[in-house]
Image (tube, rainbow, N blue to C red):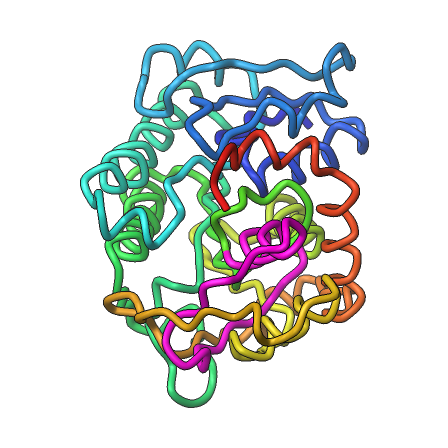
Amino acid sequence: MRLLVTGGAGFIGANFVQRAVERGDDVTVYDALTYAGNPANLASLEGRQGYRFVHADVCDGATLAEAMDGHDAVVHFAAESHVDRSIVDPARFVTTNCEGTATVCRVALEVGVGRVLHVSTDEVYGSVDEGSSSEDDTLAPSSPYSASKAASDLIALSYHRTYGLPVVVTRSTNNYGRFQYPEKVIPLFVTRLLRGGRVPLYGDGGNVRDWCHVDDNCAAIERVLVDGVDGTVYNVGAGNEIDNLDLTRRLLGLCGADESSIEYVTDRPGHDRRYSVDTERIRALGWAPIHDLADGLEATVAWYRDNAAWWEPLLGDRP
């Protein structure tokens, strides 16, 4: 398959691209290389047959059209994705996530791409006190980030309903694994602990998330790309719901630290208490997660320990 992957130098995108190239797909990565897009994530693919890189902004329709022409499908990862940053600069999230998605869909329609897979997040559902969110639930985003992703989902789906563009959407729970920029909680905490520092835990640490290994999410995206039904949303989750304090304690243990390394800090505005998604729809396609959380966290910590040359330049003099 000939794939154009926007945001392919980011965390999930780079893991997806590596799997696709190894599988034998022809892959064009289209990435603006903002702070979280890292060429080092794709260094192992340089010179590989069927792989090429285009450095450009997803909102640049002319360049995107030139890059996209001749591809079978688009996997659209490109997005601003950190909630804390969205609180400081919400306009950037609207531009990249909403305008960018509209540009991807418009160009895909113009050049005749066979499928667009739009990658989204469980955060669009908002906080869930009990049970799990299904794909048909009302969207109730809390942050500028999740609001921009909810809007981008609706933009993508509108191109299917209005113009017949073959669109599918995945909404994943929190991911973890190699190549994650050290501002998200797991790589942030691990890199600080490996440096002998302390970790900032929001509020009482009781916020609950479902942790999905990046390889499991990539496998889900691959399955939906091939077998998903046009115009359909698919939740992706691993069933690993734990609160942030439990997660922190696990990371402390894996890094050889104790609870004196925790610094409790004021909670951020609009911090959702719990996310949980119903994954029956994607499981009906034959997908299921295969990574155990304990083993996955251990392997992730080991990767950051063994790859300080990857993350230390990203941190610079920060603690």
Q: Position of residue 318 (x, y in %)?
A: 47, 41
Number of numbered discs = 0
Q: Magenta includes 200?
A: yes
Q: Residue at x 54, y 33 (%)?
A: 314
Residue 268 in the magenta stretch? The answer is no
Q: Of residues 253 and 277, which is closer to you in this image?
A: 253
Residue that extends furthest to the bottom in the rendered view of this protein: 130
Instruction: Assign the N terminus to one quadrant of the image.
Output: top right
Range drawn in magenta = 185-213
Task: Out of 279 and 78, give the one closest to the viewer.
Answer: 78
Residue at image coords 71%, 62%: 287
Quarter of the image for residue 8 reads top right
Drawn side of residue 117 relative to residue 159, left or right? right
Q: Is residue 18 left or right of residue 125?
A: right
33 relative to 86 in the view: left or right: right
- Residue 169 at x, y percent in the picture: 46, 51
Tell me which residue sits at (74%, 65%) in the image.
256
Q: Kindly indicate the quadrant of the structure image that contains residue 246.
A: bottom right
Q: Is residue 88 above or below residue 105?
A: below
Q: Position of residue 255 (x, y in %)?
A: 72, 62
Q: 79 or 40: nearer the eye? A: 40
Q: Is residue 184 above or below residue 241?
A: above
Residue at 44% from the left image edge and 64% from the top image edge: 122
Q: Give the x, y percent position of residue 27.
A: 65, 23
